Image: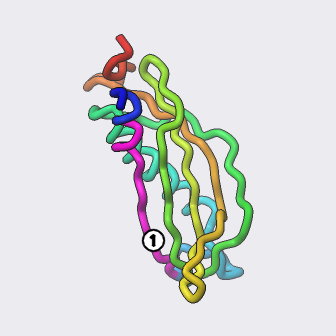
Amino acid sequence: MTEHASRTEQSRTRITKLVFPQDTNPIGTLYGGTALQWMDEAAFLAATRYARCQVVTVSMGRVDFKVSIPEGAIVELVGEVVRVGRSSMTVNVKILKEDTRASTQELAIEGSLVMVAVDENLRPIPLPGQS
């Protein structure tokens, strides 16, 4: 296995959350802003696991809200580094809504974020193997 493949595998991040009342809008579904925050957290963890250094979010690409997520739902966020540049990483994040009675998951939200490895002065630095 190459170093890139190994780091990509190690970077895969899964987070399980329960949608509480404070996470929902007036119609009882997950706030879009809360979903975006959760996606940023998953992308940060995946990118940090890949880079093994400090990273920051520099952009969020298109995010598709496919199905609503009601209060009380269990969701799983899956973050994975899918592209690596000199100092940047593109991380795809999916939010899967679980149907606990059927033991199935449905893709509810997906999007991509770009994270950049930075030094203590918040300046971009090369990723390992990307000098």
- Residue identifier under label 1: 17
Q: Which residues are magenta?
A: 7-20
Q: Residue at x 51, y 77 (%)?
A: 74
Which quadrant would residue 107 be assigned to in this image? Answer: bottom right
The residue sitting at 53% across, 36% down in the picture is 82
> Going 44% across and 17% down the picture, which residue do you hit?
86
Colour scheme shown = rainbow
Image spot of residue 88 (x, y percent) = 47, 26
Return the residue nearer the eye: 95 or 23: 95
As drawn, the residue found furthest toward the top would be: 131
Q: In the image, residue 34 lies at what x, y percent?
A: 55, 62
The quadrant of the picture occupied by the C terminus is top left
Position of residue 104 relative to residue 7, above or below, is below
How many residues crowd around disc 1 within 10 Å: few (fewer than 14), some, or many (20 or more)? some
12 drawn magenta: yes
- Element type at marker 1? strand
Above or below 11: residue 125: above
The residue furthest front is 1
Residue at screen point 42% across, 21% down: 87
Q: Residue furthest bottom?
A: 101
- Residue 90: percent from the left, percent from the top? 53, 34
Q: Is residue 102 left or right of residue 118?
A: right
Does 49 lie within the magenta span? no
The amino acid sitting under disc 1 is Lys
Q: Position of residue 75 (x, y in %)?
A: 52, 71
Quadrant of the rendered image containing residue 99: bottom right
